[in-house]
Image (cartoon, coloured by chain):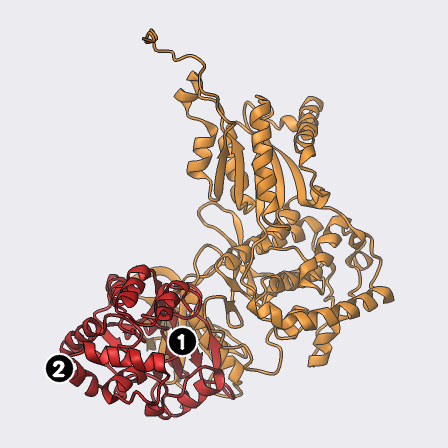
Chain colours: A orange, B red
Amino acid sequence: MPVKLQAGLRIGEFSLVELLHEGGMSRLWGVSHAQIDVPLLMKLPRIDYGETVSQVVSFEVERMLMPLLGGAHVPRFFASGEFEDQPWLVMQRLHGETLETLLGSTPLAPLRVARLGALAALALDDLHRQRVVHLDVKPGNLLLHVDPLNQQERIVLLDFGLSHHADLPDLLAEQFNVPMGTAAYIAPEQVLGVRNDPRSDLFALGVTLYQLATGKLPFGTPISNNGMKRRLYQEPAAPRSLNPQLPRWLQEIILRCLEVDPNLRHPTAAQLAFDLMHPEQVALTARADLRQGGRLMAFRRWLLTLGSRVEADEHKALPVSRAPLIMVAIDLKQSNPALDEALREMTRRAMQTATDARLACVTVLRVARIGIEPNLDAEGRSRHVKRLVALRHWARSLDLAERRITYHVLEGTEAADALIDYARSNAIDHLLMGARGVTGVRRMLGSVSSRVVAEANCTVTVVRAHALAPAEPDAGESTPVP
Amino acid sequence: MRIGLLADLHANREAVEACVEALQALACRRWVVLGDLVGYGADPAWVVDWAGEQVAAGAIAVLGNHDQAVIAGDLLSMSPAIGAATAWTRSELDAGQLEFLRALPLQVVDEDRLYVHANAWAPGEWAYVSNRLAAARSLLATPAWLTFCGHVHEPALYHLQAGAASHFAPTGGVAIPLSSQRHWLAIPGSCGQPRDGNPAAACAWFDTDSRQLGFLRVPYDHELSAQKIRAAGLPPVFAQRLGEGR
């Protein structure tokens, strides 16, 4: 007999307070605990009627994964257990609404779509770095939360019932004949049974962004297995044909997410977030100008399908790989040719290690005070452009394809702060910068690089030009040679 | 309580010492020895004595096919190299040590766990759990929620599902929560003679409270073990494979 759930019932060390949501798969109760003062949520899968095996296994997966997850983009896990026959799981209850609530007001403004997409991609990047693929990304599983401490928006990912962890046995692999996922959003390789490719989440996020930007679903809501497979060969209508207000760069990004071949999508969620945060630097391809999904494209998709089928099994052995975002900080004020060359050489090596690594060339424009927006006046603009030109010049001999390199002029009163903040908000993997000579002033104030090394949340390489030994010892007298 | 598990120790003292130290550092307070204490390696007496001390203090140990061969002394059914090595091992053990091996059970059930060297369906026939079908066969042959076995030298974790069991090759040091809703079979991998290309000794721990399982690889001085094998006049290939993990 299933347990009758009601307010006041004690389950484990928790007391049920109020029923918050009653869904087809599970019920959510607000609960309290004597020693825990953050708001708590208890999830109880339905076991009373109409449950499917996959539902039960999904909850098992969620109980297995959630205790291992951490960070700001997943709800904090507290406890799980069984109460008579009823399994349960308690997590932090976060305030906010899921993106599903925005579907009534689509199409959203393009910049809002890009902003939400960037936040979701950063959340996915955080998850992927924990060696987990979500595999059920959709508006209802993306919670927009405003941090009460700093008022900053972030996306928190919900529902890990279909997720795959690279270091844990996968309870869902091979278990079911039907593809595991949500029909409208599921990635094509996931339809074919691949469960360990983080880029599947980028496809599903692409469907979500398409929907927010146009109000339509690119592949409809198929109800059959074959219906889901149609996305393998059928090109979706170009988003700009549905919403002419949509900028070309956003169509470029969305259609890249929806590529059938995962190798043609952004290699990582961090790179997708980067594009969504820097629209002016998105390298446009034929995708940006597509009018609608033409017949030729359908044919191309069909051909690619054949390839994906063969690859499906190989993917299973692939570890979760990373295409790094590399950032090089360039000081244009104190040019030192030897150091410039050493820094370029190190950058070249870092870029060679991964073919889909991307490079952001960054310099800091010092401004006296923030808030006066010097960039808006003509003089400010020209200083800005001058630096962009200088950055391009600096990077010219790296000879990188346009899609692999971007240029950024940051403004700030402190170079170190600007660099640290940029690395953090762009999910940079590796920051390269030059070390300056130790002059008296530097010694007193501390160098920019030592602060960046201490405070940046990524790998930092400080490059030094080969230092020549002093020609003369500066000890007063030299020892006479006997 | 946290249990440390060692399988296929194969008379490798250095590997056993390294695994015990690593597992103690992870708060393991009880030991399970999954058979094949001897064979291949140069320190059978030391390993049997160590296991004997642990069993006297409450540890569990089961019999392996190499242990069986040494006590049976049936050398004719083996290849000449193995036969000679088995005879050497036998000559290294005193009566008490041989008696300890002779008294080892084929399998032990402890709470909801089964410990056995080869498999659950015919523990004394030494068939390997080397694929998903064999894993399913073993899982279906026991009511135990969790089976630990050795014999196969590669670490693996199987769970029962419809058809062949699902196979997982442990990758990192992540503690794996074992769901109580399905049956599991775990192979820690060989402590004394790893064969998956990684020379580090393999072992595992299981926490009976949190129901988490961890697989470990512990580097040890395999050159010393190899040197002792050569010095004992055992087949050089036994020494060589320790460095290659093959």
- Left or right side of A64 for A476: left
* Residue name at image x 70 percent, y 74 percent: A221
**Residue under numbered circle 1:** A88
Q: Along the horizontal axis of the image, is A328 left or right of A40? A: right
Mark 1 belongs to chain: A
Q: Position of residue B144 (x, y in %)?
A: 33, 87
- In the rendered view, tell whether residue A213 sits above or below residue B155: above
Q: Label 2 neighbourhood size at 10 Å, few (<14), some (14-19), many (20+)? A: few
Q: Residue at x 68, y 48 (%)?
A: A111
Cα gap from disc 2 to disc 1, whole angstroms: 53 Å
Under tag 2, what secondary structure? helix
Tell me, yes or no, if residue A213 can be seen here: no
Q: Are marks 2 and 1 on the same chain?
A: no
Where does label 2 land, which residue?
B96
Spot occupied by residue B211 in the image (x, y as percentages of width and height):
33, 74
Tell me the residue at 23%/86% (across/down). Answer: B71
Q: Quadrant of the C terminus of chain B?
A: bottom left
Q: Position of residue A471 (x, y in %)?
A: 45, 14
Q: Is residue B111 left or right of residue A328?
A: left
Count of residue discs = 2
Q: Mark 1 is on which residue type?
A: Trp
Quarter holding residue A366? top right
Residue A408 numbered tag: none
Chain containing mark 2: B
Residue B202 appears left or right of B47: right
* Disc 1, SS: strand
